[in-house]
Image (cartoon, rainbow, N blue to C red):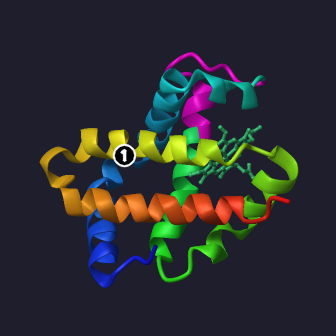
Amino acid sequence: MVLTAEDRKLIQASWGKLSSEMDNLGGEALTRLFQAHPQTKTYFPHFDLSPGSNDIHRHGQKVFKALDGAVKHLDNIRGPLAELSDLHAYNLRVDPINFKLLGKCFHVTLASSLRADYTCQTYLAFDKLFYEVADVLSEKYR
Ligand code: HNI
């Protein structure tokens, strides 16, 4: 699934509008993940997973920062995600289905922040991005 020039523009414009909320959006998406798909909590037995916990907040910031790296390199998201691709495949061994679930939770999070600005076209552009991120994070599994 290739991001068109228009997709990239929409993603980067939306990302710019989110800058004031950057610290919280990852945590919000993770909170949604753990609530909507409780089976994902099994990967975080060492975290306090109550909604809004410091663990979720801090981890959300790391995940968001990784996505930020991808958004800043839309022509080559493999570069910034390379280490995470190794980590998730070799060390964490997260079932790749969960990347799709987190992508859905990011859609809801972005939609609830951007409201009317989260148009169908913007949704589609982000859907392609999340698909690509999930693809990169899954490609080292054997
Ligand atoms: Ni993920 C650690 C990014 C999806 C389970 N993950 C990280 C880190 C980043 C990250 C960044 C921190 C690495 C470090 O400390 O060096 N994770 C991402 C991204 C996605 C993603 C960008 C998809 C968009 N991870 C998921 C999913 C799960 C997941 C869907 C499981 C449901 N990740 C983990 C676990 C850790 C982790 C578990 C280790 C947490 C810890 O600190 O112990």
Q: Position of residue 136 (x, y in %)?
A: 64, 66
Q: Position of residue 42 (x, y in %)?
A: 73, 25
- Report whether the residue tagged 1 is closer than 8 Å to ligand 1: no
Instruction: Please count the marks in the image.
Output: 1
Where 127 sits versus 108, above or below?
below
Q: Is residue 55 magenta?
A: yes
Q: Is residue 89 magenta?
A: no
Q: Residue furthest top?
A: 50
Q: Is residue 31 left or right of residue 45?
A: left
State which quarter of the image contains the C terminus: bottom right
Residue at horizontal 86 percent and vertical 55 percent from the top: 90
Where 50 sits versus 8, above or below?
above
Residue at horizontal 31 percent and vertical 61 percent from the top: 124
Residue at horizontal 53 percent and vertical 66 percent from the top: 132
Where 68 sits versus 40, above or below?
below
Q: Is residue 46 left or right of residue 79?
A: right
Q: Position of residue 103 (x, y in %)?
A: 48, 48
Residue at horizontal 40 percent and vertical 76 percent from the top: 3
Q: Secondary structure at mark 1?
A: helix
Crowd around label 1: few <14 · some 14–19 · many ≥20 (10 Å): some
For this rendering, which residue is in front, 123 or 15? 123
Tag 1: residue type?
His
The magenta stretch is 46-59
The residue wearing badge 1 is 107
Could you say which quadrant of the image residue 85 lies in? bottom right
Q: Position of residue 112 (x, y in %)?
A: 26, 38
